[in-house]
Amino acid sequence: MALPATEPHIAVEAQNLVKRYGVIRAVDGVSFQIHRGEIVGFLGANGAGKTTTLRMLCGLLTPTSGAALIDGIDIFTQPLEAKARLGYLDEEPFVHPHLTGREFLDYIADLYRMPRGPERQQRMERLLGLFELADRNGELIGAYSHGMRQKIGLASLLIREPSVLLLDEPTNGLDPRSARLVKDLLEELASLGTTVLLSTHILEVAQALCRRVAIIDRGHIVATGTMEELRAQAGAEHASLEDLFLKLTAGPESRELIERLLAPKQ
Amino acid sequence: MNLFTTRIILAAELRAWKHRLLKRGPVRLALLGLFLLVAAVTIGGAVFAAGATAGEFLPSARDTILAGGFTALSVLMLVIGFPTVIATLYVGRDLLQLVLAPIRPMEIFLARLLLAMSANLLISSLVLMGTLGVGVGSGAPLVFYPLAISLIFVQVLIVTALQAILMSLVLQWIPARLARDVAAAVAGLAGAGFYLAWNLTLRQSFTPRNRPDLPNLNTALQNVEWLPSAWPAHALSAVIAGRLGAAATWLVFSLALAGLTIAAAGIMYRRTLLAGLGVFGGPQAVWKRSTARPTVVVTRRGAGSPSRAIALKDWLSYRRDIRRLSRMLPAFLFPIGYALTFFRPSRSINGFWTEVFLFGFISMFLSSALATPSIPSEKRGFQLLRMAPMTMWQVIRAKVALTLPPVLVITLLFTIVVAAAGGSGFGQLAELSVLVIWLCVGFVSIGVSAGGIDPRFDASDDRRAVGVVGTLAGLGGAFGFGLLSVGAFALFVFGFAAAAGTAQLGGLPSTLTVGALMWVAGLALAAGAATVVGVLLWFANTRLRGFEAAIAAA
């Protein structure tokens, strides 16, 4: 199912992605397109296939079939070109626990072949300051809290200015102020042309940030579009994103389950 | 290929190592330095001296000795260094960072290969000392020494690349989630196989009661001279002999082998890197869906038992963990190796006291393999135990109760078979069985305590699951307990014989009084042994109750 195009340039494209583990199809024919400068929310229940899809899009997992394109470049046939344009933040960021925050950013900048010099240094300092990590000089990342690791992971993406960001639960573990900072930052980046695919469980974040959302359930995309389009699709005119999500990924009614659980013992 | 990237990765890793080292604090660093210095002087010095002696006095066997040394080094590295190679090439979230970056897999491979050599380089330092010793003893020309260092480095490179090839091969057929366990099992089996071969051939050359059987050793070593692992040795012995043509030929062979192995490993690594990232192997593949409804057995009466719950959890997880099961292989093959040695008629090692020491050693070996990692293997799950309404003492008891049966059964079976085959009577068999039960209970308790005293809940490998303090406490405790127990046992046996008037005690008369006195002394030693165990258990309990550092690490 393709998201309706609103801009001419496609930044991210999943083409019929399938990931199979034996007889289990974790992702089953996922297709969508995201346009440059868009922030798209990727929603789904636990185990629905969000993270597997994101990991295929960034080249960490090889799909059983299908293709993943970043700025029109296939990540599996031209990995170097595609990866240079891409920033992926895992729900548990990939950081080097035995380096300090500054050393880690320097390492990433080197890996992505960013020219050394005062400009790079200034950017690094700005990012460390922005995420309130500048005063953690000398402290190893291994000693950081989860939220701080999340921040240094984000900083390691932003230092190299990728054109596409794939973020898996980026506000997970962040304090309210930092979470707000990340939201503002993503909006600003999108306005400058960065494309963001954001996987989250926090529906308020998705509703506030994302122009469009894609909902995945048991490996299938079950709905895509703007809030209005989703409401029309679900036939619920004033429904919130939470109501829509629950309706589109319908399971047993929670009230019924709770009543059954709390029923008096016989 | 861009070597600049490889340099960046290596520089970051070296910086991380520096941080890890400096994190220890000046006192621990000084102690570590002192320990390394002492180890280098004593062990390295001894190997160097042995090499120098062989080089000086066995000129005709220089090539054979060097070939044996290089082959032994290869085998050791292949088995011992394998987990490090797997971890460096396929595991680690920092590796995922590299996969995400626009870097060629070959660049990642080269950087990680050099890092993966660390464990193997450590092992090779022993052979390096021995080889340098042979050079000094033989009066080798100056060129021998840099060549020896270079060739040992090349050998380490070849073996590390071979290990990468093995892992890549396993990944062709085995899902990533299982691959590391299967590869570790293959390495464990290989190690156990080599151990058996050692028992059945070379070890006989060092039987302590006879003079070293050098012709047997020489013949056995000559059998491995054709192996590629011996090629660098041939180059070095040719340099000693002044045959520069032969030296150059063997050198070219060795370098060509290294080039081929590394190229093959690089190509295979490129093909399997993504598949091998076990962290992202995804959920376990399910090939057939079960249609039957799961049956849940619910005990109808009585309260749930935490100890039983821990034991059941350990049992379920242990038998599903191929990696931990594979580590038990050497422990199981160890007694089998000895049993085979015993059953070779010409080489049987008879004698009641030999058996006493052997059973003691086996129970200690099995306990350290199974009991020591039992508490650290809880990993993050240890926090659940901390939060549960139970004492650490209950945890320790549950661990001892779960580990004791397999250790006891294996050692007792082995005892009965070997003692019966050795012609021991029922009385001696009963005595040995009592001793074995006592030793198993003690060693298992000590092993569990060692893990509780200094657990490393964040260790990914069981062999690193216990810190230095725990390891030293465990070793010291086991040594003390073993000596006191065997001493007590000896006093009981001789005391009984003295009371019966049949003992031969040198200057001491064989009387009832002497026998009784020996029994009292035996009881004192047994009490001492029990105290050692008790102190370690108490120490483990205290440490687990208040060891916040371990909890933070988990």
Image (cartoon, coloured by chain):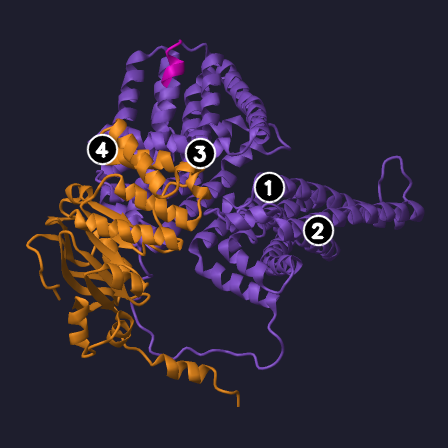
Of the numbered discs in the image, which one, if any, rests on residue A138?
Answer: 3
Three-letter code, disc 1: Thr
Q: Is residue B402 magenta?
A: no
The lab-note entry on whether marks 3 and 2 share a chain reads: no
Question: In terms of secondary structure, what is the magenta stretch mainly?
Answer: helix
Q: How far separated are the C-alphas under marks 1 and 4?
A: 44 Å
Secondary structure type for disc 4: loop
Seen from the viewer's position, the closer of residues B537 and A127 is A127
The residue labelled by disc 1 is B471
The lab-note entry on whether marks 3 and 4 share a chain reads: yes
Q: Which residues are magenta?
A: B142-147
State the hue of chain B: purple
Q: How far separated are the C-alphas under marks 2 and 4?
A: 56 Å
Q: How far separated are the C-alphas under marks 2 and 1?
A: 16 Å
Seen from the viewer's position, the closer of residues B340 and B73 is B73
Q: How far separated are the C-alphas under marks 3 and 1?
A: 31 Å
Seen from the viewer's position, the closer of residues B152 and B413 is B152
State the hue of chain A: orange
Secondary structure type for disc 3: loop
Give the class, few, some or many, for how many residues have Cα within 10 Å of label 2's Cα (few <14, many ≥20): some
Q: Is residue A6 above or below residue B526?
A: below
